[in-house]
Amino acid sequence: MAFCPSPSSSSSSSDSSSSSSSPFESSNSAKFWILHGIMAGVAVAAAVGARAYWTRVKKFRNRVVGIIPARFASTRFQGKPLVEILGKPMIQRTWERAKLAATLDQVVVATDDEKIAECCRKFGADVVMTSESCRNGTERCSEALEKLGKNYDIVVNIQGDEPLIEPEIIDGIVKALQATPDAVFSTAVTSLKPEDALDPNRVKCVVDNRGYAIYFSRGLIPFNKSGKVNQQFPYLLHLGIQSYDTKFLKIYPDLQPTPLQLEEDLEQLKVLENGYKMKVIKVNHEAHGVDIPEDVQKIESLMRERNLS
């Protein structure tokens, strides 16, 4: 008599088979979750690392002060900072333009003259009194930084005789120094006009292919062997505004004057002669400094044209 399995036993056998899994399947499942966990951990680590990197970049040289060095004595223009331009002292005009720069946390005037200090306080500027022994604007900025007693990363030296300084130029040299860790100094140049080529008051500059300064001179550089101005060459004019890493600025006064600096009477040459790097940006902006009394009328005419009151 043949044996036939009962329906119940067949069903039980089938259920038992379907409810159990092989060791191979269990192993694959475990590997999947382990791999998934590793990948998730890598992703989290990458995200944390990226955030730390960008936080570090964002914080690099991010505290910035603008300093306007001003002195009353001048061989060419006595009392220049206080000369009125359309009803306001020139130092006030410069301060108001500097205050428009987005990168500056503070703007101060550094002077050794009480008349200038009193004038600046009246229109609301922060003033730092410095000694009469400062040999140039950079040394005055260094002393002012020390007296401020704040932890700034960058100091911008803003020429007090530039009442039409563009805030974008200030921001440009600050960002250039922030983006160039191997430079301790940054500055700006623009195209030199042919009529200014032989003017010793117009400082010229040459740069390398990476945008670092090679040299500054009151003479025309480069100088053509023909002895004539090459009308086709893109000569560069130094705009004077400059920014420094504060660690470097603190040691600048201790650096001895250098031969080229003394010969050209250009303080930035001491930086280059001591082997430090200087980043240069080119801007589309004409120089409108006040060097002599006759320049005041030119500035006022420009301001009227631009509706700057």
Image (spheres, rainbow, N blue to C red):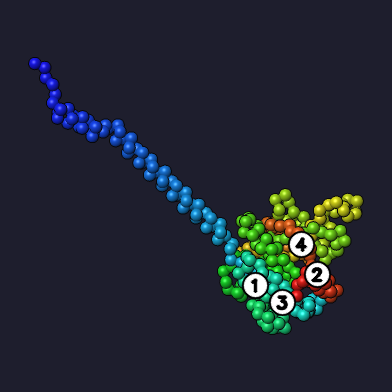
The residue that disc 3 covers is 92
- The residue at 62%/59% (across/down) is 178
Precedes in sequence: disc 1 or disc 4: 1
Amino acid type indicated by mark 4: His
Position of residue 271 measured from the top left corner of the image (x, y, whole percent): 70, 61
Q: For mark 1, does the 10 Å Cα neighbourhood hold few (<14), some (14 to 19), or many (20 or more) residues?
A: many
Q: Are marks 4 and 2 in contact (CB under 8 Å)?
A: no
**Which residue is disc 1 drawn over?**
107
Tell which circle, 4 or 2, labels the residue nearer the N-terminal end.
4
Q: Name the residue under label 2.
A: 305
Three-letter code, disc 2: Glu
Give residue 29's quadrant in the image.
Answer: top left
Q: Residue at x 75, y 69 (%)?
A: 164
Amino acid type shown at disc 1: Val
Inter-mark Cα distance, 4 to 3: 21 Å
Mark 4 sits on what residue?
285
- Residue 177 on image: x %, y %: 64, 59
